[in-house]
Amino acid sequence: MDITHIAKLSGVSKSTVSRVLNNSKKVNINTRKKVLKVVEDTGYIPNNIARSLKLKKTKTIGVIFPDIGNPFYFEVLRGIEKKLYEEDFNIMLCTSDYDDNKELTNISLLASKKVDGIIAAPNYENSRGVALLQKLDIPFILTDLPQDNLKTNGIFVDHSKCSCTATDYLIENGHRRIAVISAKRNADTTSKFVQGYMRSLSEHGIQVDNSLIVECYPNIYNGYLTIKELISNKIDFSAVITICDLLAIGVYKAARRFGLKIPEDISIIGNDNIPLSKFLTPPLTTIHQPKILLGYKSAELLLRYVKNKDKPKKSHSTVTLDIKLIKRGSVRRKDDKD
């Protein structure tokens, strides 16, 4: 059984069958149903490997994220999938779990599978994985975390602007002892998120206290542990900003553990605006990042190189998407007498 037999049984041309099997939008719905019914009845399986060898393309894009369990990356993935589906491309997804070696292994794996391009959210701000990508003859796009020392294509959000905006808002509401929980980055320099926080403090004449700056792997448990440690060590703070909403959820749990109320005792601002954030009690004030658009634009830019056979290394394109402060119930105004 091959595509010729499927075409004959369906009463259509081989090219129409091919378009149906490739999920092309150029086939009307009735013809599509008829061909798919024949495919189902005959048990025909397209020889994608042979087709890929002939076209020298796999119609597959590799995606590497550090933590697919984080709703932020899941939403970005939705945007990537939306664009790839529109263009008849498939996804091969890998997770690095913030592990350098695993990130390198995933890149090598995707290269061996002959993917047409790679979208990567690097583990760190000085990623060994990105250095490897630059050596391979595969188009790639970075998202989420830019690399200062490397010229790369990507769609990003300014993490320093996120933290600066959050810190500004807390200071406007009377807070001066503000803790920041950033993601642990394998870098010699201060993370962009912490840089934005420090810039805001400086602009308002507030001295930086290093005891209020914490880096950890961004998940709920580490948010809980961080605040638990600050409280146990009697570190004075009235507000917290976190690099992701998952960490903020951990702050909520730690506050309850010590009998503290949000926002009466601790004001919190997250970062991401994941769907869960508005259902917390009280709803979480957070920085909205356009997650689906981040993914969609990343896929769009990558496919431009894949389709045009342009070499990204020759002309670099980066786009920074805007963010927005979402004011909810987790921040209170701190009076001078507090």
Image (cartoon, rainbow, N blue to C red):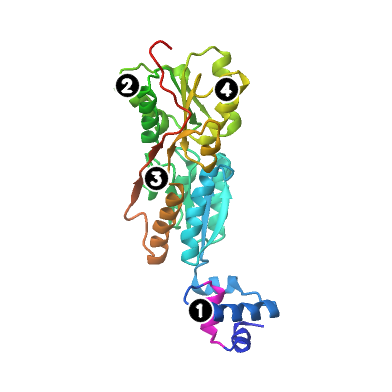
Type of the residue with mark 2: Ser
Q: Nearer the viewer, residue 80 or 331?
A: 331
Query: In the rendered image, is residue 218 in sight?
Result: no
Q: Is residue 20 magenta?
A: yes
Magenta extent:
12-23
Cα separation, mark 2 vs mark 1, equals 61 Å
Camera-side mark, 4 or 2: 4
Type of the residue with mark 4: Ala
Which of the two discs, 1 and 4, labels the residue nearer the N terminus? Answer: 1
Camera-side mark, 3 or 1: 1
Camera-side mark, 4 or 3: 4
> Can you identify the residue that label 3 sits on?
156
What is the x, y in percent for residue 4? Answer: 60, 86
Neighbor class of circle 4 (other Cα within 10 Å; few <14, some 14-19, many 20+) is some
Which of the two discs, 2 and 1, labels the residue nearer the N terminus? Answer: 1
> Can you identify the residue that label 1 sits on?
28
Which of the two discs, 3 and 1, labels the residue nearer the N terminus? Answer: 1
> Can you identify the residue that label 2 sits on?
202
Cα separation, mark 4 vs mark 2, equals 28 Å
56 over 193 or under it: above or below: below
Query: In the rendered image, is residue 112 in sight?
Result: yes
User: Which numbered disc covers residue 255?
Assistant: 4
- Residue at (55%, 38%) from the top-left corner? 279
Q: Secondary structure at mark 2?
A: helix
Cα separation, mark 3 vs mark 2, equals 25 Å
